[in-house]
Amino acid sequence: MNKILLFLCVLLFATLGCVEIPEPFSKIPPGLWKGTLVLEDDPLTNRNDLELPFNFEVNYGENDAILITIINAEERIVIEEVKFTHNRRTGRDSIFIDFPLFDTHIAAEFKENIIQGAWHVHYRDNYSIPFIAYHGNHNRFEMLDDANHDLSGEWNVRMEIETETEYPALGDFKQEGNKLTGTFLTETGDYRYLEGVVSGNELFLSCFDGSHAFYFDGEVLNSGSILGRFYSGVHYKTNWTGVKDGNNDMSNAYEFSKLKRNKDPVSFSFPNTEGLQVSLSDEKYRDKPKIIKLMGTWCPNCMDETNFLLDYLKNNPDKQIDIIAIAFERYRDPQKALQMVEQYKTKKQIPYEVLYGGYYDKAEATETFKILEKIQSYPTLIFLNSKNEVQKIYTGFAGPATKEYQNFKVDFDRIVTELLNEV
């Protein structure tokens, strides 16, 4: 009996020695990660560096493809353009995360549950921000203290305070315990989905979506007002202040942009992605109401508006209104710019024309698109009747992160219905 047991034990160990136990993941660990972009060395903070944190989740799809989902409050952005490689010579694993619509990418190395590298912006010269991410860290910001204030509600905000370019904004926040979400709405658009915390008398908010890298902080003063800083990547920073009174002097989105000549019908001609000139005098658009959309493929607010338009066309097949988008791009080279426009149109599966208008500088674009006194914002919607006369101009975009989004949807449907009923 003992010999039989000994034989079975030897056989069992021999069998186990031939079995290769698979690793729980083939590339990088699935689950939640905390990423940070290092904005600058700041001696005023308790840390050596000022960091912009954000969260993302790693999952695996078909054929072991890596899917990365960026998390900003309620928003989920799925990134499928992820490449993982192993360099046998160096023994290092590399990861490449591409944001093709925004012309940026993250290139990094992976080792021991840490991804480290940089976020690169192609359309800016020598522009990159150090990036590091840790697996299993769920906290966007570290909370040092309980919240001393409930910041929920609307705040009258001034950006770029004490400068010649100071401008108004509306802060709209929702707080649950320490957790803070919300956004800032300006006359030219909103800052999309911000997420962060309130710790003691301080607030911290951030957003990263492949294009925007926004960081806000602030301190609640004894007066009840907030004084804070705002960073957009490493190229822009300013101060802001907010008072919780709900009053605001922002211009109405339908009154902000002005026409050069109020009664003249609109006319223009720009090339499409196939190089063909498209004009409002084309037979396709003759005697029809239409919407002109000024945009840039690099602009997340423009993408939010594009998503809205695509949903509207899909959900309202009875309201056949023509849309023409005109893209003003960050590349001066027309071929490169047209490449970005074509890629955008293809990836978003846009059924209407997306034309190339020129360089994105607003002063230059105004000279090219001679209809407005000044192009104030990307995006801008121009509503035309069947005679190509301007009926409404909507500047900026109050996107789905704002309370105004629902009002915009109602207004948009009403304006479209009125245009179509006039025909």
Image (cartoon, rainbow, N blue to C red):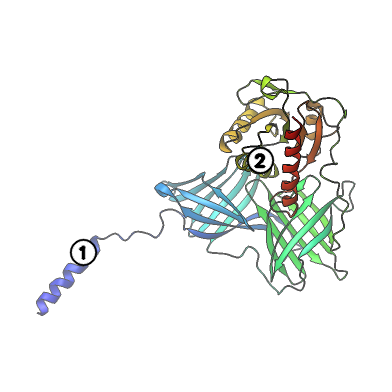
Instruction: Answer with left or right where residue 254 lies relative to residue 107.
Output: right
**Around disc 2, counting alpha carbons within 10 Å, would you say few (fewer than 14), some (14 to 19), or many (20 or more)?**
some
In front of the other: label 1 or label 2?
2
Instruction: Answer with left or right where residue 112 lies relative to residue 340.
Output: left
Question: Eyeballing the image, is 54 above or below 320?
Answer: below
Residue 76 location in percent, x, y? 59, 53
Which numbered disc, 1 or 2, marks the residue that appears first in the sequence? Answer: 1
The amino acid pointed to by label 1 is Thr
Under tag 1, what secondary structure?
A: helix
Q: Residue at x 66, y 40 (%)?
A: 309
Name the residue that disc number 2 marks.
Answer: 309
The amino acid pointed to by label 2 is Leu
Name the residue that disc number 1 marks.
Answer: 15
Residue 238 location in percent, x, y? 80, 52
Residue 198 location in percent, x, y? 72, 68
Q: Nearer the viewer, residue 75 or 289?
A: 289
Residue 211 visible from this viewpoint: yes
Residue 24's image quarter?
bottom left
Q: Residue at x 62, y 33 (%)?
A: 340
Residue 7's image quarter?
bottom left
How far apart are the alpha carbons under marks 1 and 2?
62 Å
Under tag 2, what secondary structure?
A: helix
Q: Quadrant of the N terminus?
A: bottom left
Q: Nearer the viewer, residue 376 or 388?
A: 388
